[in-house]
Image (cartoon, grey):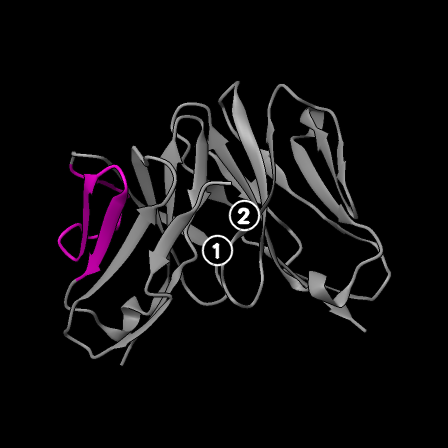
Amino acid sequence: AQKVTQAQTEISVVEKEDVTLDCVYETRDTTYYLFWYKQPPSGELVFLIRRNSFDEQNEISGRYSWNFQKSTSSFNFTITASQVVDSAVYFCALSGNNDYKLSFGAGTTVTVRA
Amino acid sequence: GAVVSQHPSRVICKSGTSVKIECRSLDFQATTMFWYRQFPKQSLMLMATSNEGSKATYEQGVEKDKFLINHASLTLSTLTVTSAHPEDSSFYICRGKEGTEAFFGQGTRLTVV
């Protein structure tokens, strides 16, 4: 069974602070995919990143960066110099190689205050 | 990127009526459609998986006679909530898959009064 744990329920920061969202996963699959999605108040899911289990390179995209540590089954997400527009719920998700079904974490609500 | 168009975005219906939600893949052929549900302040949970031309596979605890899924073509899948009740009020979102890529629709916020 797949399981994703996002231990942080809510994080509140002041604009320009960095914020790191934790994600720990469990799976028996040797090949799997990890995702991060942003869900703003409007509700739609905004795709941020997909990483396959064989690619442990960290990634940076603008103010976003991701740290994949297979040894600790973690896929953490950092927003650098946060902005008010970053306020949203962020979900980490996992899918196995064969079915593409997503198992979501509980989500972390990020509030960035001006 | 590929687009899944989901309609309606919001719907309010009376208890006991049925509501149909449509997901159309606009520039790809969705051989598989996943349907998720998200209750307020909760995470997304997979309800069912449908492959074009086949009966949907429902996750444990999801009533197949209440949530009717039709995936008759590669570009259209529908979810019908039958005899809706207030406890069915939720955010429903589809995810269409072609090959190794999959894309979410915009979601439908259903309120049953």
Please say if A21 is above or below A56.
below
On residue A112, the disc is none
Residue B77: in magenta span: yes
Question: Quick check: B90 left or right of A24?
Answer: left
Q: Nearer the viewer, residue A14 or B60?
A: A14
Q: Which residue is mark 1?
A: B43
Question: Quick check: B39 left or right of B79?
Answer: right
Q: How many marks?
A: 2
Q: Which residue is mark 2?
A: A105
**Quadrant of the image occupied by residue A74:** top right
At 46% from the left edge and 28% from the top edge, which residue is drawn? A96
Asked which secondary structure carries label 2, the reply is loop
Confirm or deny contact between disc 1 and disc 2 (CB under 8 A): yes
At 23% from the left edge and 54% from the top edge, which residue is drawn? B79
Same chain, labels 1 and 2 = no
Q: Which residues are magenta?
A: B55-81
Gap in angstroms between the C-alphas marked 1 and 2 = 7 Å
